[in-house]
Image (tube, helix red, strand yellow):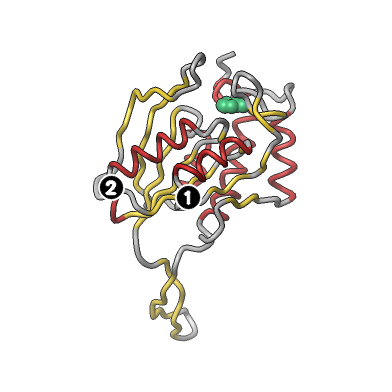
Amino acid sequence: MQQHLTIVDHPLIQHKLTLMREKTTPTAVFRQLLHEISLLLGYEVTRDLPTTTRRIETPLMEMDAPVLKGKKLALVSILRAGNGLLNGVLELIPSARVGFVGLYRDEKTLEPVQYYFKVPEGLKDRRVIAVDPMLATGNSSAKAIELLKQAGATDIRFMCLLAAPEGVARMKEAHPDVPIVTAALDERLNEKGYILPGLGDAGDRMFGTK
Ligand code: URA
């Protein structure tokens, strides 16, 4: 993956994202739309995975058919909102191992605080796809990537739903080697670190906690 930032402007994604942004969209619909978008983003975030060929027999003849090659994958959900993107990507890559990084944002300092970390062994030999819907200040995402690197990961990509320019800049500064795939790049952050126009708190909207 060459570019640092990829915005997936597919009409289906953009339509579904608009529905998610609307404040009247109910929790169950919001979650379903996020799941549907995760499948489409998952398609894009895996676009450059290398392939090789395997000799197979169709009912009619032999052929050299493409199969994925190289490193196995690990998906890492940044809790809790990352779980809204996780299952879709896991449906696309059912054999991927799964890890979780628990970070919450201190609402005063906006700094990430770690409360959970459990990732597959041998992370250094895996391609890692970290998922979190909202790349806002970038502090949590940069921290999560730092923890993954400390655990041995060297090949990481980051998939989110919405990104703020501030978050993209923070990630570029901290982890220029980590490509970002997002459905949209919004305008800016507000004083509380929420993305504008955004969609509000992704975790709350997904789980109905507010
Ligand atoms: N996290 C969210 O859920 N929403 C934002 O706008 C920013 C961070």
Quarter holding residue 118: top left
Quarter holding residue 148: top left
Quarter holding residue 207: top right
Residue 24: x and y in percent read 74, 21
The kind of secondary structure element at disc 1 is loop
Q: Which residue is mark 1?
A: 176
Residue 80 is marked as none
Q: Mark 1: which amino acid?
A: Pro
Residue 180: x and y in percent read 54, 48
Q: Quadrant of the C terminus?
A: top right
Give the residue drawn at x 29%, y 49%. Answer: 123
- The correct choice, above or below, for 91 with respect to 204 in the image is below
Structural distance between the alpha carbons of marks 1 and 2: 17 Å
The answer, for residue 29, to whether it is visible in the render is no
Give the residue drawn at x 51%, y 60%. Answer: 1
Residue 152 is marked as 2
The kind of secondary structure element at disc 2 is loop
Q: Considering only order in the chain, which callout, 2 or 1, is on the residue closer to the N terminus? A: 2
Quarter of the rendered image showing ligand 1: top right
Q: Residue furthest bottom?
A: 61
Q: Mark 2: which amino acid?
A: Gly
Residue 39: x and y in percent read 57, 48
Report the mark closest to the observer, 1 or 2: 1
Badge 1, how many Cα within 10 Å: few under 14, some, many 20+? few
Q: Is residue 195 left or right of residue 160?
A: right
